[in-house]
């Protein structure tokens, strides 16, 4: 598998190149099912996450990226699978839940696309919250701050403590579970943004 072959080299290169400064690094360590969520500004964001997390991560990617047999082969060999953002893609949701039920790590960008600026995040799609609730999987939020590599700036990553959807649901009995979990993710990401920018 391409991912397994390239992963050690990618981790080494990106850690030497970006010299990531990570807040709360221990929260990245996980066993069993887990969902890593992150803001999304650069095309390389999935690679950065793969570089700083020791586990293999299955990423959900927009279906338009799987535009040819070559791209399908490439992305699937890197453990990515497509999601149709224009519809309620039940097939992709089932696949994500199946991965989590097998104890795998799953990565997703809840904005659904790259954001125009680092500071402003777009509204989060509720799909991540739905999957977390359905699979009863903890969510580990990350906020990445990029800098122009030409100026030798280090990559900054703030990592939040796991969000347990069952606990969020229990704390908000009068609120729809999906909305409550999505709000918890949003609040965590806003907090991590401030932490990362201050690092």
Image: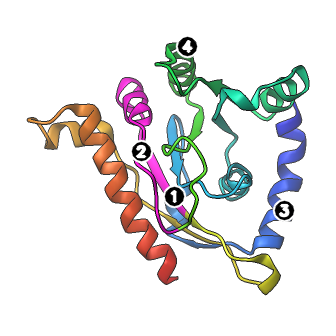
For discs 2 and 3, the disc positioned in front in the rendered view? 2
Find the distance from the CA under tag 3 to the CA under tag 4.
34 Å
Q: Position of residue 187 (x, y in %)?
A: 32, 57
Highlighted magenta segment, given as a residue range = 119-143
| First reached walking from the N terminus: tag 1 or tag 2 | 2
Q: Are marks 2 and 4 in contact (CB under 8 Å)?
A: no
Please give the residue where the numbered disc 1 appears in the rendered image.
142
Q: Are marks 2 and 3 in contact (CB under 8 Å)?
A: no
Left or right, 110 with reference to 22? left
Asked which quadrant contains residue 44, the reply is bottom right
Q: Position of residue 34 (x, y in %)?
A: 50, 39
**Tag of residue 70:** none
Indicate the secondary structure of the residue bearing disc 4.
helix
Q: Residue at x 78, y 86 (%)?
A: 151
Indicate the secondary structure of the residue bearing disc 3.
helix
| First reached walking from the N terminus: tag 2 or tag 4 | 4
For discs 2 and 4, the disc positioned in front in the rendered view? 2
Q: Position of residue 58 (x, y in %)?
A: 66, 34
Please count the marks in the image. Answer: 4
Please give the residue where the numbered disc 4 appears in the rendered image.
91
Find the distance from the CA under tag 1 to the CA under tag 2.
14 Å
Specify few, some or many for label 1: CA neighbours under 10 Å numbering under 14, 14-19, or 20 or more: many
Q: Residue furthest left?
A: 174
For discs 1 and 3, the disc positioned in front in the rendered view? 1
């Amino acid at each position: 598998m391409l991912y397994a072959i390239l992963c050690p080299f990618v981790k080494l290169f990106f850690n030497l190149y970006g010299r990531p400064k990570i807040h709360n690094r221990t929260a990245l360590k996980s066993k069993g099912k887990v969902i890593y969520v992150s803001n999304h500004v650069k095309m390389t964001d999935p690679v950065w996450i793969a570089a700083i997390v020791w586990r293999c991560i299955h990423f959900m990617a927009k279906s338009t990226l799987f535009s040819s047999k070559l791209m399908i082969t490439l992305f699937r060999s890197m453990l990515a699978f497509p999601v149709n953002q224009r519809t309620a893609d039940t097939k992709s949701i089932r696949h994500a839940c199946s991965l989590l039920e097998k104890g795998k790590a799953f990565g997703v960008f809840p904005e659904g696309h790259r954001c125009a600026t680092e500071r402003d995040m777009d509204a989060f799609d509720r799909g991540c919250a739905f999957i977390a609730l359905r699979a009863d999987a903890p969510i580990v939020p990350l906020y990445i701050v990029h800098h122009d590599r030409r100026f030798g700036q280090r990559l900054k990553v703030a990592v939040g403590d796991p969000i347990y959807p069952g606990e969020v649901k229990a704390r908000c009995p009068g609120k729809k579970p999906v909305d409550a979990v999505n709000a918890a993710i949003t609040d965590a990401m806003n907090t991590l943004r401030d932490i990362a920018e201050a690092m």
